[in-house]
Amino acid sequence: MLIPNSSTFRTEIHGVIPWDYSQDYSQDYSQGHAHDRAPIHRLYELAKANQWNANTDVHWQTDDSLDAFPCSEEANPLRGFPDYDKLPEAERRRLSWWQHRLEMTEILHGEQAAMLIASQLVSCLPTVEAKLFASTQVVDEARHVEFFSRYLTRLGGDISGPSAALLSLIQTSIAERRWDMKFIACQILIESLAMARFQELRQRASVPELRFAVDYILRDEARHVRFGVEFLREHLAALDAAALEERSSFVLDNVLKLANSLHLYDRIGVAKGWDPAELRRHLRRYRLQHPEQNRQRFRQLALNMEAVGLLTARGRERMKKMNLLA
Ligand SMILES: [Fe+2]
Ligand SMILES: [Fe+2]
């Protein structure tokens, strides 16, 4: 599917303008006061204290640090596939950069989606505290867009559009009228998958500025996820079973599509003329031999779904069947 340079959307925002500002902002929330709105306000305070600048705080490299592999090859599922193993190292490195670039591009588009959805949440969320925090998230996501677009520009070449799966999720979430569905798409689905990916990058990436920025980005994302969990938990507890199941299914319907949205190994296999059936067999064997690698990727999502009450009995069974949960 060919995706043009930009996409459009039309949506009707249903929001709330609260006139109640009764929160006592003078209290020291870091000491954990018993107040039902305190967790959100604490996160807002953290957000203000932990701002960073993608332009000046990141040690942007100008040397040839792009000569090595972008990530360690240790967890590359293609290893052990004879056609891959016999490629010269220079070709394996080229493939690794091609794959890295596509993955970072998908993350960049996800960051822009998070920025757009967070900006809608400023309007939609029902309390002043939540709006204040959501406004810091808009700035955080803008910084992530800034970092990844600059990083990809440094790597060179064109930035391609999002995958069909990501584009579809972005358009659905932006056009969605219900604020909690937007919130779930952004804070539970996109952010949980992104956090798992960032944790992987922190362990495996070799590019210095990426390793450096990922630490800061993870701290921001952890705040956003925490906000989602704090705010959604109470809201979802008041929904009936059918509404809860609808939201749980929405997350699980999208998770596998997103996780394999780029079809990286199929594309490499086609480009290299490898036997598709053999490649599929190898990848299936690899997944069975390394179940932890896959589960690690979805552990954060399962934890966050559980924390807000979205991991219903049916949802848990589905995750087990998809081999995302033990
Ligand atoms: Fe982000
Ligand atoms: Fe985020």
Image (cartoon, rainbow, N blue to C red):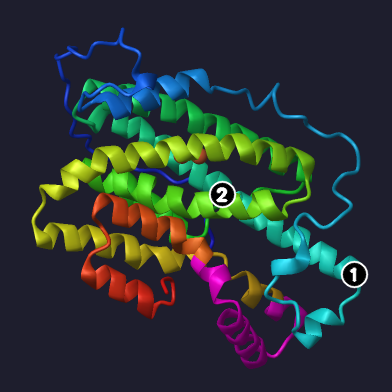
Q: Quadrant of residue 108?
A: top right
Return the mark for residue 291. Answer: none
Left or right of 309? Residue 115 is right
Q: Quadrant of residue 38?
A: top left
Q: Which of the pair 118/205 is nearer the observer?
A: 205
Name the residue at 36% across, 50% down.
Answer: 188
At which x and y percent is residue 212?
A: 70, 37
Q: Position of residue 58 (x, y in %)?
A: 71, 29
Q: Position of residue 233 (x, y in %)?
A: 23, 45
Q: Is residue 49 left or right of residue 250?
A: right
Whether residue 178 is visible: no
For the C terminus, the image quarter is bottom left
Task: Return the x and y of residue 84 as percentages of the image width and height.
Answer: 79, 80
- Going 23% across and 41% down the picture, which residue do you hit? 179
Depicted 21 relative to depicted 147: above or below = above
Residue 89 circle label: 1
Is 179 contained in the magenta span? no
What range is drawn magenta here?
Answer: 269-295
Magenta span: helix, strand or loop, mainly? helix
Residue drawn 77% across the image and 29% down it:
59
Q: Marks 2 and 1: in contact by CB < 8 Å?
A: no
Q: Amino acid at mark 2?
A: Ile
Q: Residues within 10 Å of mark 1 (few under 14, many from 20)?
A: few
User: For mark 2, does the 10 Å Cα neighbourhood hold few (<14), some (14 to 19), or many (20 or more) residues?
Assistant: many
Cα separation, mark 1 vs mark 2, equals 27 Å
Q: Secondary structure at mark 1?
A: helix
Say whether residue 284 is left or right of residue 126. right
Residue that mark 2 sits on: 107
Q: Which of marks 2 and 1 precedes in the sequence?
A: 1
Task: Give amino acid for label 1.
Answer: Glu
